[in-house]
Image (cartoon, coloured by chain):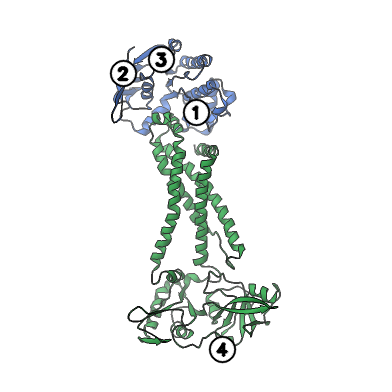
């Protein structure tokens, strides 16, 4: 019977190219948007290179200082000294890496300027992340203690600066802002969408212009706290809060007197969200994402219900015939649901192909350097589930209405 | 076999009430060939729809093989229509997207019949109406007479006890009409019980019994 339904579905699709186009266009567009968006969110927030330990990392990226009136507020990254005293000293984590937010510098090759994004880090930065060294190795505590002028560069910078993709450049020098740095390692770059690890060139924090010796609480540094296990997160957060709680208040920092200080160790999503929603929690973020997803899925689903009602209404006579020859309402309901799921899955296949093409286009376009968007298994499974939900949502209601149609009325249609 | 007792049918709108059938009593016996005649709008098709469980009477009782169907649910009524009744409509009501063979198979889809058996029975029914050479065709590729023969094949494929034909020759010319009636006659000779609505006296004369309606009332 199912093969009969599918055969009929196929013929109905061919019979009404316009309806078919509208239906498939709606499904394909919605699912494509959904899949590309999911893929982008996964790229942005998921655990990916070089932050492959993100799922067991906490990020300490901001310090908020407020005065008594709450009118005056100072917010931003911290100083190296602050992180050294209050984060590096944590006992619960496996490791703590410190790095600056990325800064800017210039270098020149044959008179041509190359704009660089720079980052100053400690040696543990290379341990809490998993950069792929295509040449050389990271700098060590010894390089840092010695104040060596060394640098880790990306493969892209190697190609631009040394104009060679293959040969080793370890030991060669790169001139940045009139200071010569010896290249110690070459890594595959991190996308700009991962700002805590993104950079073209990485220096030890003791290199010139790092400002690591600045006093005070605020500065350009952040910390990535790697837990032994994500179940340690609450303990780490408590320990960090306890460390920070020991700071006597009020204090004066850079001429600003503050009576209240807030800083938290957050998982990446929460940290990312707090940039947009100051002080809010992931519940709100999830609610907003959920609402947007619902709108993205719900509105086209309502549209599809309408298209399907028209499509099915047109077949009232067929329903009358089938009922006259013994089709129970339930059998007809299933017929139309199967038809709809079939159509939705066809739309899903189109959407999958289109999403794959768009993702390849984004990855290869260079809009996001080192972009690595993928349709992974979870995105694919979620998309298939969405297809089925769509099939049911847009099929059940019209199918139910039609299956309840009086035979004589259906035959007169 | 099929008994109608005191059947009434009233159509109601917010302002108008129309009595379509008034106190109809009819007993269809096994092997009978009955014609229902009367002027347009007298309730012939309504009567046939009620006999075929396609519509519900406002009053009265329908019994099939001695069982009253008044309290039957959708599933039980569907089973009765599937197993005991076969319909032939004036406008054929074939599904244009399905081939002739697939159209004829429709009643068997709602039985526990394998695809192979369905195919065999449908082919057999099409052979009976002389259309075995048109199985792969689609309704749009057929003439009116051929379409009605497909509709007859569909009505008989499940070997129902009663065939209900609503003006089966109404859309056909006299030659085609006679061919269709010949087929119905042959089916009746082979044991099928047939109730046929018709406007044509000549056709009615070829049946065993005539039921005549006027303004919803049985006058003969």
Is residue A363 shown above or below A121? above
**Which residue is label 1 attached to?**
B94
Residue located at (39% from left, 65% from top): A284
Q: Nearer the viewer, mark 4 or mark 1?
A: 1
Kindly identify which chain the residue marked by label 3 belongs to. B
Left or right for A141, reference A88? right
Please name the residue shown 39% across and 18% down the image: B40
Q: Point out residue B128 in the picture as x, y percentages from the top left corner.
A: 53, 20
Secondary structure at numbered mark 2: strand
Which chain is displayed in blue in the rendered image? B
Provide the secondary structure element on which disc 4 rests. Answer: helix
Q: Which residue is mark 3?
A: B35
Looking at the rendered structure, whether the residues under marks 4 and 2 are on a common chain is answered as no
Q: Is residue A280 left or right of residue A141?
A: left
Which chain does the residue under circle 4 lie in?
Answer: A
Q: How far apart are the two marked residues, 4 and 3, measured between alpha carbons? A: 110 Å
| Chain under disc 2 | B
């Amino acid at each position: 019977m199912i093969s009969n339904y599918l055969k009929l579905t196929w013929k109905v699709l061919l019979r009404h190219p316009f309806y078919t186009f509208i239906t498939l266009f709606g499904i394909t567009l919605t699912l494509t948007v959904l899949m590309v968006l999911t893929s982008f969110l996964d790229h942005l927030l998921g655990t990916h290179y070089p932050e492959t330990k993100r799922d067991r990392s906490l990020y300490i990226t901001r310090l908020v200082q407020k005065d008594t009136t709450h009118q005056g507020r100072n917010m931003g990254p911290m100083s190296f000294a602050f992180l050294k005293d209050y984060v590096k000293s944590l006992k619960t984590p496996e490791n703590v890496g410190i790095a600056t937010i990325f800064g800017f510098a210039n270098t020149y090759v044959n008179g041509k300027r190359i704009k660089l994004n720079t980052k100053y880090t400690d040696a543990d930065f290379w341990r809490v992340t998993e950069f792929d060294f295509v040449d050389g190795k990271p700098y060590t505590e010894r390089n840092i203690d010695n104040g060596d002028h060394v640098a880790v560069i990306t493969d892209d910078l190697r190609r631009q600066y040394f104009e060679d993709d293959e040969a080793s450049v370890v030991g060669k020098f790169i001139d940045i802002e009139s200071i010569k740095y010896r290249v110690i390692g070459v890594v595959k770059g991190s996308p700009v969408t991962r700002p805590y690890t993104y950079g073209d060139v990485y220096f030890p924090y003791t290199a010139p212009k790092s400002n690591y010796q600045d006093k005070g609480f605020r500065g350009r540094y952040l910390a990535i706290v790697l837990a032994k296990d994500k179940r340690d997160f609450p303990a780490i957060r408590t320990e960090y809060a306890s460390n920070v709680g020991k700071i006597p208040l009020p204090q004066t920092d850079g001429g600003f007197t503050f009576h209240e200080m807030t800083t938290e160790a957050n998982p990446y999503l929460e940290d990312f969200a707090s940039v947009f929603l100051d002080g809010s929690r992931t519940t709100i973020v999830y609610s907003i994402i959920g609402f947007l997803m619902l709108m993205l899925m719900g509105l086209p689903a309502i549209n599809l219900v309408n298209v399907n009602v028209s499509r099915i209404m047109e077949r009232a006579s067929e329903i009358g015939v089938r009922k006259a020859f013994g089709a129970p309402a339930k059998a007809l309901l299933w017929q139309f649901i199967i038809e709809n799921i079939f159509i939705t899955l066809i739309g899903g296949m189109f959407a999958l192909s289109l999403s794959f093409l768009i993702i390849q286009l984004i990855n290869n376009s260079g809009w996001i350097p080192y972009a690595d968007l993928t349709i992974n298994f979870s995105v694919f499974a979620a998309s298939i589930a969405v297809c089925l939900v769509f099939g049911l949502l847009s099929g059940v209601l019209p199918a139910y209405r039609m299956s309840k149609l009086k035979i004589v009325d259906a035959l007169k249609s | 076999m099929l008994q109608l007792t005191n059947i009434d049918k009233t159509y109601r709108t917010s302002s108008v009430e129309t009595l379509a059938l008034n106190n109809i009593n009819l007993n269809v016996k096994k092997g009978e060939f009955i014609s229902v005649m009367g002027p347009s709008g007298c309730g012939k098709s309504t009567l046939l729809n009620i006999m075929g469980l396609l519509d519900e009477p406002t009053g009265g009782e329908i019994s099939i093989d001695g069982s009253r169907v008044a309290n039957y649910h959708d599933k039980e009524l569907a089973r009765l229509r599937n197993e005991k009744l076969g319909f032939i409509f004036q406008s054929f009501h074939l599904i244009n997207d399905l081939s002739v063979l697939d159209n004829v198979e429709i009643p068997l889809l709602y039985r526990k019949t394998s695809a192979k058996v369905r195919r065999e029975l449908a082919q057999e029914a099409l052979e009976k109406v002389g259309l075995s050479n048109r199985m792969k065709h689609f309704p749009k590729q057929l003439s009116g007479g051929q379409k009605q023969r497909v509709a007859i094949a569909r009505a008989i494929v499940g070997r129902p006890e009663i065939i209900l034909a609503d003006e089966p020759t109404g859309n056909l010319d006299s030659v085609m009409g006679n061919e269709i009636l010949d087929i119905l006659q042959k089916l009746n000779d082979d044991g099928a019980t047939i109730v046929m609505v018709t406007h044509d006296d000549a056709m009615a004369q070829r049946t065993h019994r005539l039921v005549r309606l006027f303004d919803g009332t049985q006058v003969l």
